[in-house]
Image (cartoon, grey):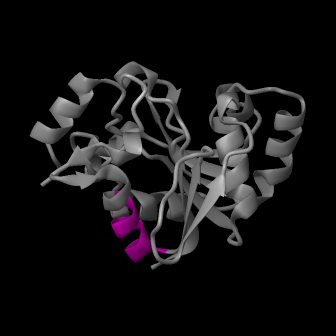
Amino acid sequence: MFDATAIILSGGKGSRMGSVDKSRIKIDDTPIIEHLVEKLSKWFKAVIIVTCAGRTYDFPNVEVVIDAAPDFGPVMGLYCGIKASANEFNFVMACDMPWPNEKIIALLLSQIGDHQAAMAQINGKYQPLMALYRKEIEASLLARVSARQHRLIDFLDQLDIALITEAEIKAIDPLMQVFTNLNTMADLATARKHKPS
């Protein structure tokens, strides 16, 4: 079990899927959020769900935190999750990414060292919602929230990040299914057809 907290961000509007709550979408007759909580609870000492007012979850030993300003975007969700965490290391993922990978999480933990975060960089782009963050970034997140600076990429540019290469990811997950993201109904159909073995 990882000596860390898993934080699931579940406050998005799902506008590209008809404004549905993507955490409730089913794969194999099971809502994604149940699938994620089941896995992450086995791997982590603590699990936190950050969501918007009006959404309720009832999982044993899982803390639910209400996003103070869901329209602010993932910076606020990240801040609320990190603030609620009691652990130094915090694995953060979006609720619409159904295939977390235990070996890739272990890779992130092995590479973070003294850095503030660890994440993959694919085709020059950070993968911040399948990433590891230190508790110490809480103050920097609060400063951005207070200044109404909501762009996550701008925040990442200020961090000391241990970057994981595409080759390192593919050595574990050749199809990089860990980064599968359900933004559209087409994405969902593809995910249902091509589940990790």
Q: Specify the farthest residue to the front.
A: 54
- Looking at the magenta stretch, what is its main secondary structure? helix
On the question of residue 23 being in view, the answer is: yes
Residue positioned 32% across, 51% down in the render: 32
Of residues 119 and 29, which is closer to you in this image? 29
Of residues 110 and 138, which is closer to you in this image? 138
Q: Is residue 74 magenta?
A: no
Q: Which residues are magenta?
A: 36-44
Of residues 178 and 108, which is closer to you in this image? 178
Residue 18 percent across, percent down from the top left: 37, 22
Answer above or below: position of 85 versus 137. Answer: below
On the question of residue 96 being in view, the answer is: no
Name the image quarter holding the N terminus: bottom left
Q: Is residue 97 left or right of residue 4?
A: left
Residue 126 percent across, percent down from the top left: 53, 33
Q: Is residue 186 left or right of residue 93?
A: left
Q: Is residue 24 left or right of residue 161?
A: left
Name the image quarter holding the C terminus: bottom left
Residue positioned 34% across, 68% down in the render: 38
Residue 196 percent across, percent down from the top left: 17, 50
Residue 163 percent across, percent down from the top left: 55, 43
Residue positioned 86% across, 50% down in the render: 139
Residue positioned 29% across, 52% down in the render: 31
